[in-house]
């Protein structure tokens, strides 16, 4: 039986054709049929409902921080949030407007990525020297310490061989100095390739290798909709209609009924700015008592359950090093 991480990656490779080797700590998920979604986007809504945990992590920039706030008494939660709100108020006018919230959330996304990546690096760093070799990675991922052994293990499975090749490509692309080792500064590109521009070419190449069946350098709608076996979509389903609409209106910018590289990247690479803007709108809508389109420091503190949660509300998701992350923001 394959190790847990390999099973997860194997499933991901079937879904979209661009397998990512994220372990469970990264939270990396994909849409059931198409496209990549960062942990932020994936956790924004659940069954059509806004997730409070997403709000808290977007404000605090740390899973650990959200966890700590989850267990704070309301008064302590408000006290700490007051200090955070003052930092959100970049121009010092005692209000936090949408632009300030968007910038704050984008910074939070970056620190969340760093936190997740360092958790993964710690898991894979077998000799605890603060960096990861390819050998350490395959040992953690496959339970084998030699690439030849892994190749022999998966030699009869084309999909698993492709998965290993894709994994190696991502590792090499993240290894910016080409020394065969992922330093702390390089590892986030490997663990979260969708968030780093220098990784996007690899993601594109891997997606096209799996999905561009006629090898014309473009992705048709049928290729976009085909399942991992290449079977054509069923045109009578609601999902088909929704994806057809998305393909036509959101992705096929030039209207030629196929996706070129630029349009493919719109599909593969999530837009954190759009996600941050949506989150800022939600925070303002939820907390703007006087409906002036911006938040006073007091409005933020009064709605601490929305922003950070506390023991009394059951909102929140994680923080042990609150001061570390808030100081960095």
Image: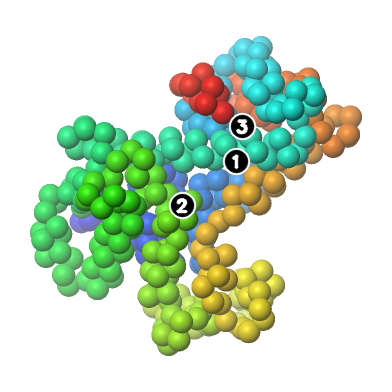
Label 1: element kind? helix
In the image, residue 139 sits, relative to residue 114, either above or below, namely below
- Which residue is nearer to you in this view: 73 or 151? 151
- Dividing the picture into quadrants, the one containing residue 204 is bottom left
Q: Mark 3 — residue?
A: 59
Q: The N terminus appears in which quarter of the rendering?
A: bottom left
Q: Is residue 167 shown above or below 97?
A: below
State which mark lies toward you, 3 or 1: 1
Query: Could you say whether the residue bearing mark 3 is in a helix, strand or loop?
Result: helix
First in residue order: circle 3 vs circle 2 = 3
Q: CA distance from mark 3 to mark 2?
A: 22 Å
Position of residue 133 relative to residue 147, above or below, is: above
Circle 1 crowding by C-alpha within 10 Å: few under 14, some 14–19, many from 20: some
Please tell me which residue is depicted at 40% across the width and 70% down the height of the picture. Answer: 205
The mark nearer the N terminus, 3 or 1, is 3
Write down the quadrant of residue 129 in the picture: top left
Query: Which residue does the numbered mark 2 point to in the structure image?
Result: 196
Vertical placement of residue 87 versus 252, above or below: above
SS state under label 2: loop
Dots 3 and 2: beta carbons under 8 Å?
Answer: no
Residue 328 in view, yes or no: yes
- Say the numbered circle drawn on residue 106: 1
| Location of residue 242 by image quarter | bottom right
| Residue 307 rendering spot, x and y as whole percentages | 66, 29
């Amino acid at each position: 039986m394959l190790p847990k991480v390999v099973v997860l990656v194997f499933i991901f490779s079937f879904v979209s054709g661009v397998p990512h080797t994220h372990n469970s700590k990264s939270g990396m998920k994909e849409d059931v049929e198409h496209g990549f979604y960062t942990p932020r986007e994936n956790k924004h809504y659940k069954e059509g409902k806004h997730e409070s945990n997403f709000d808290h992590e977007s404000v605090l920039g740390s899973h650990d921080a959200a966890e700590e706030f989850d267990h704070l008494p309301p008064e302590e939660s408000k006290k700490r949030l007051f200090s955070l709100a003052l930092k959100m108020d970049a121009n010092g006018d005692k209000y936090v407007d949408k632009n300030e919230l968007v910038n704050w959330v984008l910074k939070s996304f970056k620190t969340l990525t760093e936190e997740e990546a360092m958790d993964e690096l710690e898991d894979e760093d077998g000799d605890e020297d603060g960096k990861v070799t390819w050998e350490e990675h395959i040992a953690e991922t496959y339970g084998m310490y030699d690439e030849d052994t892994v190749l022999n293990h998966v030699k009869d499975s084309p999909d698993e061989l492709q998965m290993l090749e894709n994994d190696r490509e991502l590792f090499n692309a993240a290894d910016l100095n080409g020394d065969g080792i992922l330093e702390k500064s390089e590892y986030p590109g490997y663990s979260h390739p969708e968030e780093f521009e220098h990784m996007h070419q690899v993601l594109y190449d891997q997606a096209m290798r799996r999905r561009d069946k006629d090898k014309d350098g473009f992705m048709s709608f049928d290729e976009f909709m085909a399942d991992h076996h290449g079977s054509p979509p069923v045109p009578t389903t609601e999902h088909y209609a929704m994806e057809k609409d998305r393909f036509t209106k959101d992705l096929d910018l030039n209207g030629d009924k196929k996706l070129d590289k630029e349009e493919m990247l719109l599909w593969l690479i999530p837009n954190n700015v759009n996600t941050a803007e949506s989150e800022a709108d939600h925070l303002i809508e939820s907390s703007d008592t006087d409906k002036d389109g911006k938040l006073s420091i007091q409005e933020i503190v009064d709605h601490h359950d929305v922003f950070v949660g506390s023991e009394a509300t059951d909102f929140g998701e994680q923080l042990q090093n609150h001061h570390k992350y808030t100081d960095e923001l």
